[in-house]
């Protein structure tokens, strides 16, 4: 059955058929599809034919709420025969009883889940959460029919549930078995504990799910991060405070919790002193274990016993907090878990680091192997991986360990003449050159000339926040005759959206942001909201200890450490930033790259230009 609800644009039918074939053959489809190919609607229509025939569920994995809304909107366009539901992860804000408590806002899904169980417990035979109790009296099937026709997005669904006095999270779980398409964040599938529950709620095993991975170029990094764990100096201070508040328990022959904290702090300071170079330093694999043993004068077996004792103390603290409806968190417990994980962890796929972030140094065990968390992609019925920037596809497959793959690259469908991409060979952001006064002054001059060449909305992508700060301090803004808004470090999502909206609706505004930051991915700037991007330099990653370890690892595994860790991610970042320009067939735009090294960078399609301001004026005068 052809579910496609619109008139096919060029390439779309081919894409739907390609996905359908991959699903029918139980293969993975790895697809780079340019702007305008309609990734959401084509992936839904390519999977739904087989899925509906065989009772398989389509699980659409997204990174953001706006992507979830898009899945709901496209399912609505297909029609009422498709039941689509979007579910957000658990947080205090999704619970009507917890959302007003500021302490709980910091709670993770596991902590909120524990607190929820406490609320659901019966006291004198009565459940303490009325939003949960009322679910029992609700006709789930009639709600399912209503949702099938009303197609609420995630926020609307939460509102509908609350208006009816139902817990949005618990009630959505009951609706999942009815759904053909379920849009969920990545953790639902890639965090084992959540996946087990998700499988129970949906009522079908992973082998009966087709996974669609949106913005798939993010997946390898996401999977590495999921497996990475770290522990900071600030967290150690919180352990000391917790021990003071709850009693400083003895763990082993005169060694108390605060003694362990003191020793951990000493070890962290010594790691910084001995191994830190600039941002990070690589530690020997047994560094922490050896130091703990020698400084505390105990054996590795005793350390393990002390960790167990701290976990038990932490369990007791969490239990008490839970009973008081407080965030069930114990810093003593977290420290024990960290020490255990660090000592027991896998040596081959992890690099152990000391990292300095501001005034908060930390230990980090960074997982270099994305495929270690990619089992669901092997165990599911079929998986569809889509992005506008996924090439080289074979590298993506290797990183994730995908087998049985069908590959497709589809160009964007909008007229090529709507975009001009140029670079200059007059400046370079190479480490050794970026601060040479002649190069730096020329670079600043070129930014000014390019931005001032035409009065269109322009985004200037800096290689880092610190470089942006330096240029701003050196008077860049005063030399632009325009209003400037900024993407700033650590901005909250609402603050970022505010900046984004202000810029989008401005007339000839300038946005300062960072390549690879949140502005450069996932946000849509239609029409005149963005007509020019200026990329300062090539965003190669900093040559940190972590990067060097990754290079060695990928050299050994796939014979191309520089490609996997440096060239491929850099080109993807640049293409993402440049891709903000053309979002529809009437959009036009200019991408300017200020760095001569582009000439040797495979994958970036830009022409050398000796007079960029003139070329820009000529392009916009056409
Ligand atoms: S059942 Fe729902 S409303 Fe009740 S405590 Fe749990 S999350 Fe909150």
Image (cartoon, grey):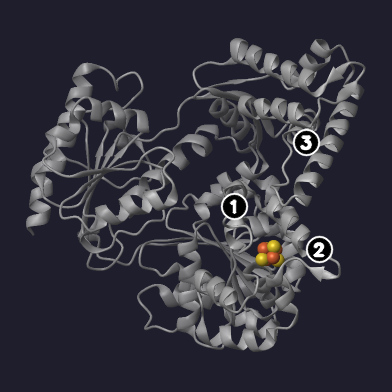
Q: Is residue 435 positioned above or below 616 on the image? A: above
Image coordinates of residue 181 in percent, x first then y, are 60, 75
Q: Is residue 549 positioned above or below 156 on the image? A: above
Say which quadrant the C terminus sits in: bottom left
Left or right: 504 in relation to 160: left
Image coordinates of residue 326 in percent, x first then y, are 70, 48
**What residue sits right under mark 1 in the picture?**
101
Mark 3 or mark 2, earlier in chain: 2
Mark 2 or mark 1, earlier in chain: 1
Dividing the image into four quarters, tell me where ligand 1 lies. bottom right
Q: Secondary structure at mark 2?
A: loop
Residue 121 is labelled as 2
Q: Is residue 595 positioned above or below 521 on the image? A: above
User: Considering depth in this image, is 499 or 299 the residue closer to the camera?
Assistant: 499
Say which quadrant the N terminus sits in: bottom right
Residue 333 is labelled as 3
User: Considering depth in this image, is 345 or 241 the residue closer to the camera?
Assistant: 241
| Number of residues whose C-alpha sits closer than 10 Å to that of mark 2, classed few (under 14), some (14–19) or many (20 or more) | few
Displayed quadrant of residue 429: top left
Q: Confirm whether residue 364 shows in the render.
A: no
Residue at the spot 14% in from the left edge and 33% down from the top edge: 478
Q: Is residue 251 positioned above or below 420 on the image? A: above
User: Considering depth in this image, is 63 or 50 the residue closer to the camera?
Assistant: 63
Residue at the spot 21% in from the left edge and 17% down from the top edge: 437
Cα distance in 3D space between marks 1 and 3:
23 Å
């Amino acid at each position: 059955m052809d579910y496609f609800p619109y008139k096919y644009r060029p390439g779309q039918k081919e894409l739907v058929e390609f996905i359908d074939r991959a699903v029918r053959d139980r293969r993975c489809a790895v697809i780079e599809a340019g702007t305008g190919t309609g990734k959401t609607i084509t992936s839904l229509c390519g999977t739904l034919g087989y899925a509906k025939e065989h009772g398989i569920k389509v699980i659409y994995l997204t990174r953001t709420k706006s992507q979830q809304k898009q899945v709901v909107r496209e399912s609505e366009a297909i029609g009422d025969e498709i039941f689509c539901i979007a579910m957000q992860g658990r947080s205090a804000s999704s619970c009507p009883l917890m959302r007003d408590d500021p302490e709980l806002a910091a709670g993770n899904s596991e902590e909120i889940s524990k607190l929820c169980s406490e609320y659901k417990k019966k006291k004198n035979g009565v459940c303490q959460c009325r939003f949960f109790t009322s679910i029992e009296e609700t006709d789930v099937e009639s709600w399912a029919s209503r949702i099938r026709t009303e197609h609420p997005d995630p926020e609307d669904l939460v509102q509908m549930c609350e208006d009816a006095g139902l817990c949005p999270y618990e009630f959505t779980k009951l609706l999942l078995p009815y759904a053909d398409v379920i849009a969920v964040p990545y953790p639902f599938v890639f965090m084992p504990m959540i996946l087990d529950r998700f499988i129970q709620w949906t009522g079908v095993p992973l082998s009966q799910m087709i996974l669609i991975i949106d913005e798939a170029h993010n997946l390898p990094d996401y999977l590495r991060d999921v497996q990475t764990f770290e522990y900071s100096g600030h967290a150690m201070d919180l352990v000391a405070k917790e021990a003071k508040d709850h009693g400083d328990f003895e763990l082993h022959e005169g060694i108390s919790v605060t003694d362990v904290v003191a020793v951990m702090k000493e070890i962290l300071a010594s790691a910084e002193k001995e191994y830190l170079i600039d941002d990070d330093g690589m530690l020997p694999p047994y560094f922490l274990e050896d130091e703990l043993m020698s400084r505390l004068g105990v054996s590795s077996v005793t350390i393990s016993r002390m960790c167990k004792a701290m976990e038990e103390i932490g369990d007791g603290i969490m239990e008490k907090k839970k009973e008081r409806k407080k965030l069930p968190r114990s810093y003593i417990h977290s420290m024990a878990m960290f020490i255990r994980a660090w000592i027991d962890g896998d040596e081959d796929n992890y690099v152990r680091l000391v990292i300095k972030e501001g005034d908060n140094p930390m230990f980090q065990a960074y997982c270099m192997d994305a495929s270690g968390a990619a089992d669901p992609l092997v165990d599911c019925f079929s998986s569809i991986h889509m992005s506008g920037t996924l090439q080289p596809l074979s590298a993506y497959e290797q990183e994730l360990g995908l087998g049985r793959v069908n590959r497709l690259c589809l160009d964007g469908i909008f007229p090529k003449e709507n975009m001009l991409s140029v670079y200059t060979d007059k400046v370079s952001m190479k480490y050794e050159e970026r601060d040479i006064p002649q190069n730096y002054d020329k670079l600043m001059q070129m930014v000014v000339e390019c931005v001032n060449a035409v009065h269109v909305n322009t985004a200037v992508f800096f290689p880092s926040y610190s470089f942006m700060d330096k240029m701003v301090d050196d008077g860049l803004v005063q030399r632009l005759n325009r209003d400037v808004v900024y993407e700033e470090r650590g901005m909250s999502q609402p603050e970022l959206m505010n900046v984004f909206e202000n810029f989008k609706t401005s007339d000839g505004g300038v946005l300062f942001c960072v390549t690879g930051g949140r502005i450069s991915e996932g946000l849509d700037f239609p029409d005149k909201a963005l007509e020019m991007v200026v990329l300062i330099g090539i965003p190669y990653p900093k040559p940190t200890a972590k990067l060097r370890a990754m290079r060695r690892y990928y050299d050994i595994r796939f014979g191309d450490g520089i490609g996997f860790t440096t060239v491929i991610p850099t080109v993807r970042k640049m293409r993402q930033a440049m891709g903000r320009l053309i979002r529809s067939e009437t959009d036009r735009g200019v991408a300017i790259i200020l760095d001569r090294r582009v000439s040797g960078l495979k994958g970036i399609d830009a022409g050398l230009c000796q007079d960029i301001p003139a070329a820009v004026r000529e392009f916009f005068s056409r």
